[in-house]
Amino acid sequence: MAEAHQAVGFEFTVIPEGADAQLSHQALTEIYLSAVNSWKKCIIRIKNSVIRGVYPASPFSWLFVVIAILATMYTRSDPSMGLIAKIQENLPVSQSLSTQCKVLLSAVIFSTMLWLLLIFTMRLCLKQLLSYHRWMFEPHGKMSTTTKVWVALVRIFSGRKPRLYSYQASLPNLPVPAVKDTVKRYLESVRPLMDDAQYEHVTKLAAEFESSLGNRLQWYLKLKALWVTNYVSDWWEEYVYLRGRNPIMVNSNYYVMDFLYVTPTPIQAARAGNTIYAMLLYRCKLNKEEIKPWLLRSAVPCCSYQFERMFNTCRIPGTLTDTIQHWKDSDFIVVYHKGRYFQLYVYQDGRLLCPREIEFQIQRILDDPSPASKGEARLGALTAGDRIPWAKARAKHFNSGINKKSLDCIEKAAFFVTLDDEEQSIVGDNLGESLDCYIKSLLHGKCYNRWFDKSFSVVFYKNGKSGLNGEHSWGDAPVLTHLWEYTLATECFQLGYNAEGHCKGEVDASLAEPQKLNWEISSECEEQISQSLEVAQALANDVDMHVVVFRDFGKAKVKKCRVNPDAFIQIALQLAYYRDQKRFSLTYESSMTRLFREGRTETVRSCTNESCAFIRALEGGETTDVCRRLFRTASEKHQRLCRMASTGAGIDRHLFCLYVVSKCLGVESPFLKELESEAWRLSSSHIPYQMIDLFDTVNHPEYLCYGGGFGPVSASLI
């Protein structure tokens, strides 16, 4: 085959005298281009490290300081107050240099030390400034004088044109709340869910914990906080995500949707071509750190740590715990179609393939008539079932030979692509029913046509619709949504399609065909695949998902009523649950803690005394004025809880870490055990959209990505 010849650098001819090896000119060219590309990436990494290391100053500011010091010395002044002379006396090469050279070198050394001191001071000042969070608790549109001064200082110390990771060293560490404060907030959160006897019992357990074991566990947490940047994130990733032994499909992975009302092209390969190209453009910007960091209110930076593992990342199964493996780079993706896996290189001669070329390669895969090898078609079910069987199967059947080579290809790929042979239509009279089917397909598919361990999988349907399935352990959904919105905007408003619906551009006829991955699946391995598939299908069939399209009004109308949209939705959910179940429930809402370094999420307990008081009044037939007043109070309480969670004063992550410490010490706490038994029957988290300003929703209101969501957190709401 042509691609086999292009992949080999030597051509061997066996003759009686021995082997005659002839060097391939094309192979040498490929090696040279690969080396050039590798050195370019290395230089970019070094450049980014330097720029990031001296932020909020710039490398050019060093030259300015040196010139300023030399200019001052030229006027016969000593800005160093004798330090330059001391440096000059202790230079190790002072004997071999002239007096003028020694003075110059000493001035440069002093200038560099002064420059580094200024950088350290600016970074320390910025870190202290970013520890101020009172601005979050001020009424919207009513900024205090203190906050105005604070914003001005933050902008001064933030420097110019920050890169994606520029703020990382200046972000404050997540504070450890006081045990008594966390316990107090916890008791307040469970009061509407318990009768008097239950609440009195929990209060006694809490008081005992606070006065005894809690202080001991807290000491260990404070010790950890002194040594690490975030006392929660590593344990959260390890114990909540990676140590989970149940299927990650549905239970952990999430979905992100396509445009609701627009399909840019009905051609599956063309949609894949533009989308894959846009994602790889994003990766290039990510590697160069050209993506702007997230700034709240255009001034306050959020942690960008999670972006590092977006591409070239895979979750590796283990018997006790999984691990996250990240590779620095990958020049190929893996594509699944009709039970077969293909390796598709997206670079040739050091350049990224254009959208039309990627479309051409995808069409080759769609047209490939080769059948799936024995056991290959449902291989992906291993990633959808329980983790321990997958870990054992991986160690036994995929640790050598062809299987290891093919599995390495999937795991090291930039990301995973599924070319689905089904159509998903989300238009027409049965929009709700169509959305139900579409979302369930994104969430779990056929339980074997996604690789759930990859950081994310892109799904392209036969009629041009698309979507994402994201793995949760490496990062949170808003980070992946940022990539997806950039991709959709770039695909539609920058790349576009021609009149026939194909990608624009020309195709290089010398492109090697995508390589089909080979497998040797034993009967024993096939049996394990079948068992994992059975577990996954039972889980998928148990998911009852229904989407309601609500068009009556949106957040703009809620804001006109001077009500926070999130608080409005959360209280509405409490009301709906109460009317359905005739009781209140412990409710989970996710809030970000990315104002702190390596921050991820905190829980907002949406069911509050205030929201329950409003619902009881409404259901009890109280007057409109009374209900309106109680609603305002509940809304304000919810907003305060969200702000407290975002600023490190939440409840659940602190209690979680105290529980981990107790397990490490081998001590039992009745209070923490009570927490462990609580069930989150209602989860109200969602995946946001319109996070970037690349969409013109005024002139193109149909181009809206409707976010995404998660599977259920409980087997039943009852």
Image: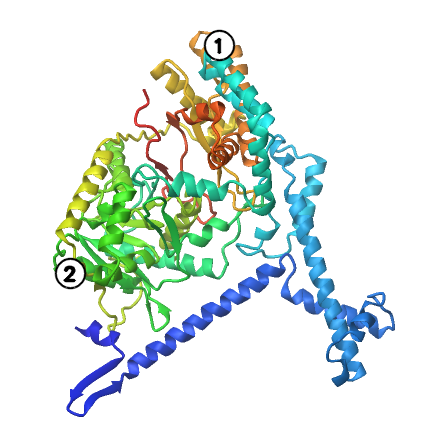
- Identify which amino acid the numbered label 2 is placed on: Asp
At x 55% / y 27%, what residue is drawn? 213
Q: Answer left or right for 211 relative to 541.
A: right
Q: Residue at x 53, y 11 (%)?
A: 625
- Above-or-below relation of 147 to 408: above
Image: 576 above or below 389:
above
- Nearer to me, 145 or 697: 145
| Residue lying at the far front of the rendered structure | 666
Q: Position of residue 404 (x, y in %)?
A: 25, 59
Colouring mode (rainbow / by chain / secondary structure / one colour)? rainbow
Nearer-N-terminus badge (2/1)? 1
Res 636 seen here = no
Q: Which percent across, then down, holds residue 53?
A: 60, 60
Q: Which residue is mark 2?
A: 368
Q: Is residue 585 left or right of residue 111?
A: left
Query: Would you say residue 222 is visible in this rendering?
Result: yes
Q: Quadrant of the C terminus?
A: top left
Q: Which amino acid does the dot numbered 1 rest on? A: Asp
- Residue denoted by label 1: 196
In this rendering, would 186 be left or right of 73?
left
Label 1: state its secondary structure: helix
Compute the Cα span from label 2 to label 1. Answer: 68 Å
Residue sitting at x 66%, y 35%: 143
Answer with the quarter of the image where residue 21 lies.
bottom left
Instruction: Give the class, few, some or many, for how many residues have Cα within 10 Å of label 2's Cα (few <14, many ≥20).
Output: few
Q: Helix, strand or loop at disc 2? A: loop
